[in-house]
Image (tube, grey):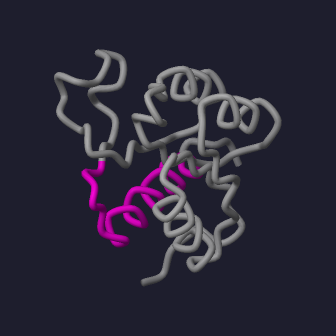
Amino acid sequence: MPHNLPGKRVLVVEDNPILAYDITDLVEDVGAKAVGPAFDLATGMRLVSEKELDAALLDIDLGGELVWPIAEALDRHDVPFAFVSAQCQPELLPEAFRARVCIDKPARHSQIIEALVSFVTRREDSSPD
């Protein structure tokens, strides 16, 4: 499937190392550059502040810490993101994030790629030429 992901920088925030590296490998397999993975809130926050990002994939529960501060920081930087989590029920999400893409675990690779392509396309379409 043709897409616009080569060279895009995608932050991966996931506390489970097996899942984190699976998502990182997926991102890189489609030609994007994985940033991270960040296994905890502090590392994720540091990467958001230090790196230029095009998109992000966020687990919600990072070993008992919730990812909301990272999501808020990404919003402030206008970086699109999706949650990839077992906690995608709208009532568990803060009001500000209920309209965000939330991919239920176990996530299919095609769902993750579809979300990334959608983010990058919207971002490119809205940027001035």
Q: Please provide percent x and percent y for residue 38.
A: 64, 45
Residue 49 relative to residue 86: left or right: right
Residue 78 occupies quadrant: top right
Q: Tell me the residue at 48%/81% (across/down).
A: 2
Q: Tell me the residue at 37%/49% (across/down).
A: 84
Residue 11 relative to residue 22: left or right: right
Residue 44 occupies quadrant: top right
Which portion, as a residue range, is magenta? Answer: 103-125
Q: Please provide percent x and percent y for residue 9.
A: 69, 56
Q: Please provide percent x and percent y for residue 98.
A: 27, 26
Please tell me whether residue 78 is drawn above or below residue 7 in the rendered image.
Answer: above
Residue 40 relative to residue 119: left or right: right
Residue 61 relative to residue 36: left or right: left
Q: Is 85 one of the magenta-colored residues?
A: no
Q: Residue furthest front?
A: 63
Q: Is 116 one of the magenta-colored residues?
A: yes
Q: Tell me the residue at 58%/80% (across/down).
A: 29
Please tell me whether residue 69 is drawn above or below residue 51 in the rendered image.
Answer: above
Q: Please provide percent x and percent y for residue 10.
A: 62, 54
Q: Main secondary structure of the magenta part?
A: helix
Q: Tell me the residue at 55%/45% (across/down).
A: 13
The N terminus, quarter of image: bottom left
Q: Residue furthest top?
A: 95
Please tell me whether residue 127 is drawn above or below residue 76 in the rendered image.
Answer: below
* Number of numbered markers: 0
Q: Residue furthest bottom?
A: 1
